[in-house]
Amino acid sequence: MVKTETLFKKASKEEEQIVLSFLLKEFDTKVREIMNNKSIFIKQRGVKEVYIVNEELKDTIEFIRNNSLELTKNIFLAGYPIGTIHEKQFQLEITGGFYFNKYMEKRLIIKTKQFLYGKDIVLANVKKYTLPFKKGNWLAVYGRGKKDSGLFYGVGKALVDSNELSSAPPNTVIIKGCKHRPFDLGWYLRFEK
């Protein structure tokens, strides 16, 4: 078995651009607010995991790097995980969805908890959506709560435009569930060992 060394480092310009392009596309003008005093770091061990690191933590990491090469090797991770980079594309994951959901204006409120079990969200299961959305937009998914805002369940990519929903059959899949990628909070329970 080949042992792979874990590398935790500040994102390269290319990696940073991949993540920022995604954030600009999904959150537009809120990117400045989201990234204010934050840096992007990468944990690489086969997969490139993406972390947001605040300025104070970034300074601590830099201090360790500048003063102790041996300690630098032991930095495994720091900050808040938001997703991964695969084949030069950023993939938002549940922790990133949780971090960004307050900035996500396009929300889908659903009637049941099926999404938490990795199941598809079909039109018949949708209570409402907050803003029109296009195919490919990332949506924050909420369940019904005591208040209309509901409980955050996860994130998903729309497979249809919202303007198609009025004439679509009830079994139209709006967001494809995923049992093997962390898009919903139930993922942690399904893969707990």
Image (cartoon, rainbow, N blue to C red):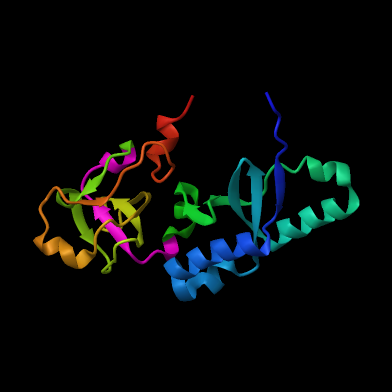
Q: Which quarter of the rendering shows the N terminus? A: top right
Is 105 colored magenta in this rendering?
yes
Give coordinates of residue 87: x percent, y percent: 53, 51
Give coordinates of residue 32: x percent, y percent: 55, 73
Residue 128, picture quadrant: bottom left
Task: Tally the marks.
Answer: 0
In this image, 153 relative to 30: left or right?
Answer: left
Compared to 26, does 80 lie above or below?
above
Compared to 152, does 70 lie above or below?
above
| Residue shown at the point (20%, 53%) measured from the top left | 126
Which one is nearer the viewer's eye here, 50 or 14?
A: 14
Please, which residue is most extreme toward the bottom here?
29
In this image, 106 relative to 127: left or right?
Answer: right
Give coordinates of residue 130: x percent, y percent: 27, 65
In this image, 26 relative to 9: left or right?
Answer: left
Which one is nearer the viewer's eye here, 96 or 26?
A: 26
Which range of residues does the magenta coloring cover? 102-116
Is 5 colored magenta in this rendering?
no
| Residue shown at the point (87%, 41%) measured from the top left | 70
| Residue shown at the point (29%, 66%) measured from the top left | 134
Residue 44, picture quadrant: top right
Give coordinates of residue 158: x percent, y percent: 30, 57
Residue 109, picture quadrant: bottom left
In this image, 12 relative to 49: left or right?
Answer: right
